[in-house]
Image (tube, helix red, strand yellow):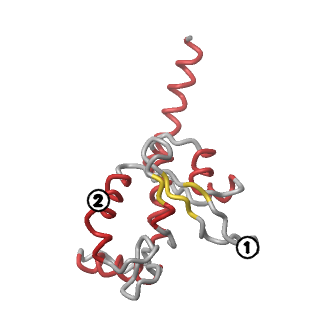
Amino acid sequence: MRLERCDVHPGQGPSGRPYVRFGKAANTFGPRPRWMPMLDGIDQVLAWYLADIRHLFPDTPVLFPDPSSGPLKPEAVRDRLARLLDLEDRPAERFTPHTLRRACVTHQYERGMVLIAVQQFLGHRHIASAMAYVKPSARFVEDAWPRATVAAVADLAG
């Protein structure tokens, strides 16, 4: 993620937002800039990083620099995640920052975030693209019918 320090806006929204200017390109449309909410205490982690850690790196605009002061590359994050999985004796699997993105939106969907909000959160133009990210657990799917039935009966009972 090519964020720069100027992209972080702690006063935007309830817990701050980064402005992702260099988002992923879609087909031939090029990168789509978007505002992202900082959820689940990320604002506090980022504030700690900026106050206590970031000054230890070279003084560049890059928010998360690599050793050469350039933006941290996705491969570096993937390699680090793979190393952490290895240290935890987890099975070798492809685990990437994008996997974390998918897991985040799936968990939010399972907690009740509506699909249109998931679409906006991801910055997708089409709801179908957002739906491809949501992979609910078998338990969530199994429990969906009773939840919907209870809600329907409650609506009918008035």
Image quadrant in which the C terminus is located? top right
Residue found at the far right of this picture:
28
Instruction: Using the image, determine if residue 81 lies above or below residue 111.
Output: below
Comparing 151 with 56, the one in front is 56
Residue at which label 2 appears: 48
Q: Position of residue 131 (x, y in %)?
A: 62, 55
| Residue 157: quadrant of the picture | top right
Comparing 147 with 123, the one in front is 123
Residue at the image position 29 percent from the left and 75 percent from the top = 90
**Mark 1 residue element:** loop
Residues packed near mark 2 inside 10 Å, few (<14), some (14 to 19) or many (20 plus):
few
Comparing 139 with 132, the one in front is 132
| Res. 27 mark | 1
Say which label, 1 or 2, has the lower sequence index: 1
Residue found at the far front of this picture:
59
Name the amino acid, label 1.
Asn
Q: Position of residue 85 (x, y in %)?
A: 30, 76
